[in-house]
Image (spheres, rainbow, N blue to C red):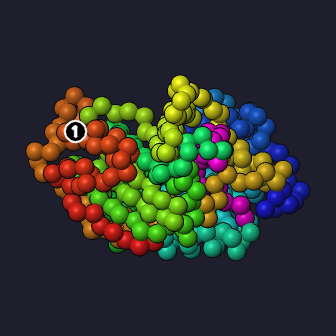
Amino acid sequence: MSGMHTPGRELPLPIVLAGARGHGRWHLRNIRRLQDKGLVRLAGICELNALTPDELAEVFEDFEDFGGRPPEQSADFGALLDSTGAAIAVICTPIPTHTDLALIAAGRGVHLLLEKPPAPSYAEFRRLADGVAAAGVACQIGFQSLGSHALPAIREMIASGVLGTVTGIGGAGAWARDEAYYRRAAWAGKRRLNGVDVIDGALTNPLAHAVVTALALHGASRAEDVGTIETELLRANDIESDDTSCVRVTTPRGRVAVAATLCAERPGEPYVLVHGSGGRITFWYKLDRVLVQRSGHGPEEIEYGRADLLENLVAHLTGGDELLVTPESTGAFMKVVEAIRRAPDPVALPADAWETVPAENRRIVRGIDGLVAAAADSLALYSELGASWAAPNEVSTG
């Protein structure tokens, strides 16, 4: 796909944002940044309840860039795309709505930046990916970590033998989320809502980047790269979904194991760990920071830049730059989502395994920080690390 998809289009490209509250605020600010660079123009906002002037003013101090008028707002996504002549739609709505909204845009020839996770099941993902491909529009999936310049640099290090033979990839995310996090929306912390898949768990949403980045560094990003998937899903909070979980993916190239919790005792930066026979590379993917440790050399720390995914989409449409995160490149991640969807419901941790931190209104799992790190370090699951509360793992075949 190249710039020929937007014949006669000149910068700035008109954009419609669907879902402008919550994480959508980040997209509003980013669109403002790119608008200031002359690349895009916020033409419309799709929300069930329109943003107030005060909410808009938090990001856009005035409306001079809109000819003195604020962007058009509507709850009807298709009508808004038509009336604004949008070239790009940014979709940051609840997970179960992604596929239908993306296909509404694709049917109108509108290109897409779709927030992660792209869909709550593999069947919905296929409907999305196949529909977008058939429509011939560009679709970028919003895994920001895959825009990091650290990824090609680490791949080059691996290829040049810096680590010797790669023996596996680990991932660790020890985060904290308070009780309010699970009340932020009707679908928060749910596996299903009104009979529809949501799958809003630790590994599939907040720490999805750890999974997708580990798979990408393993060179196993497509659905066909995945063999078996083992899951252990648990919860300390009073929710349907998992808040403390781990997954191990076996591929023809080896193993990828990622452990995550939203109940950390001391929350830290999530990271991916490349294990080699002659060293290791730690990648703190939110910081674009890399630590290289190898035999016979002192440790080396490097900071990288990052490509913005919306900016990359604009460059793809206008100059033919390669898209960084196509739907197909998230196929392996979606196989993990599907394994988690099909696994038994998460097991409630026993009352003596967790405690409440009243000052922070959140629950912590005792000893979980060490277990998350040990899982990334050894590619083991919680049950294999001796966690008394860990359920036997559930194995599914990709």
Instruction: Name the residue: 71% across, 38% down.
Output: 34
- Which quadrant, please, contains the N terminus? bottom right
Residue 240 at x, y percent in the picture: 27, 59
Residue 362 at x, y percent in the picture: 24, 38
Instruction: Name the residue: 47% across, 52% down.
Output: 168
Q: Is residue 205 magenta?
A: no
Residue 268 at x, y percent in the picture: 38, 33
Residue range highlighted in magenta = 137-159
Name the side, left or right, on which 54 lies relative to 113. Answer: left
Q: How many marks?
A: 1
Instruction: Name the residue: 65% across, 33% down.
Output: 305
Residue 312 at x, y percent in the picture: 72, 47
Q: Residue furthest right?
A: 8
Does dot 1 land on a helix, a strand or a loop? loop
Quadrant of residue 390 in the image? Answer: bottom left
Residue 19 seen in the figure: no
